[in-house]
Amino acid sequence: MADKEPIRVVICGKSEEVGRGIIAGLQPEVEGKPIHSMTHTVSQQLLLRREILRTLSQGENTDSPARASPTLVIHFGLSPAALAAELPAVLAGRAPASASSGLGTGNYQEEEGGRPRRPRAVVFGGAWDGADVETVRAAVRGCGGEGDGVVMLRHDGRKPSPPLGPAYGPHVVQRVKDVLGRLVRGEEVEWAGEGVVWY
């Protein structure tokens, strides 16, 4: 069976120390397939779910649907404002002129056929609120077609989490993987707003 190709993501976190652990937990060996953000209406969700399943089934064995695609962190931003400034270049397949962090693979180069290796999701750490997420969403929307299909994953503070420490990173990694897996498989997720999903 062919391994599933990873979903490229960007992380917005307040601490590189925590970010390193989360990136290590998400990091696979190769790069690949996109996910698509789903919208709020039932008919649009059904159409997008079909498209997700069709896209994911092309050229790979899908006899293990519960297995999530691995994740590849290509960029890490240390604040919503910094990430909003960096994302236009990242979405266009280029390194930002000035990066707030050196974490992530930094692999922005183009795939065969000249298409950028765009991230399909932006994952926000627990330090960021709805206004912070909207700052980054506005930057993604400002990228036009290059921002299409990029979903925001917002930390859900209502769910219990361990305190910052050794158990925190693995806990966050599992929550992110679970939500990305549900998006890829077209399963239900909890929406925090348009284009934003709780994890």
Image (cartoon, rainbow, N blue to C red):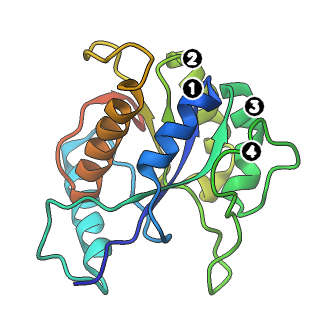
* For residue 17, side relative to residue 43 (left or right): right
User: To which quarter of the image does residue 193 belong?
Assistant: top left
The numbered mark at residue 102 is 4
Nearer to the camera, 70 or 115? 70
Residue type, label 3: Ala
Which residue in the rendered view is the most extreme toward the left? 63
Q: Is residue 152 visible?
A: yes
Q: Secondary structure at mark 3?
A: helix
Q: Which residue is mark 2?
A: 131
Q: CA distance from mark 2 to mark 1?
A: 5 Å
Q: Which residue is mark 1?
A: 134
Of tags 3 and 1, which is closer to the observer? Answer: 3
For the point 50% across and 26% down, the residue is: 125
Q: Which residue is mark 3?
A: 82
* For residue 155, side relative to residue 67 (left or right): right
Q: Secondary structure at mark 1?
A: helix
For the point 25% across and 78% down, the residue is: 57
The percent position of residue 70, horizontal first and vertical second, equals 37, 60
Residue type, label 2: Ala
In this rendering, the answer to whether 147 lies above or below 168 is below
The number of callouts visible is 4
Residue type, label 4: Gly
The earlier-in-sequence mark between 4 and 3 is 3
Quarter of the picture holding the C terminus: top left
Q: CA distance from mark 4 to mark 1?
A: 24 Å
Of tags 2 and 4, which is closer to the observer? Answer: 4
The percent position of residue 187, horizontal first and vertical second, equals 17, 49
User: To which quarter of the image does residue 137 belong?
Assistant: top right
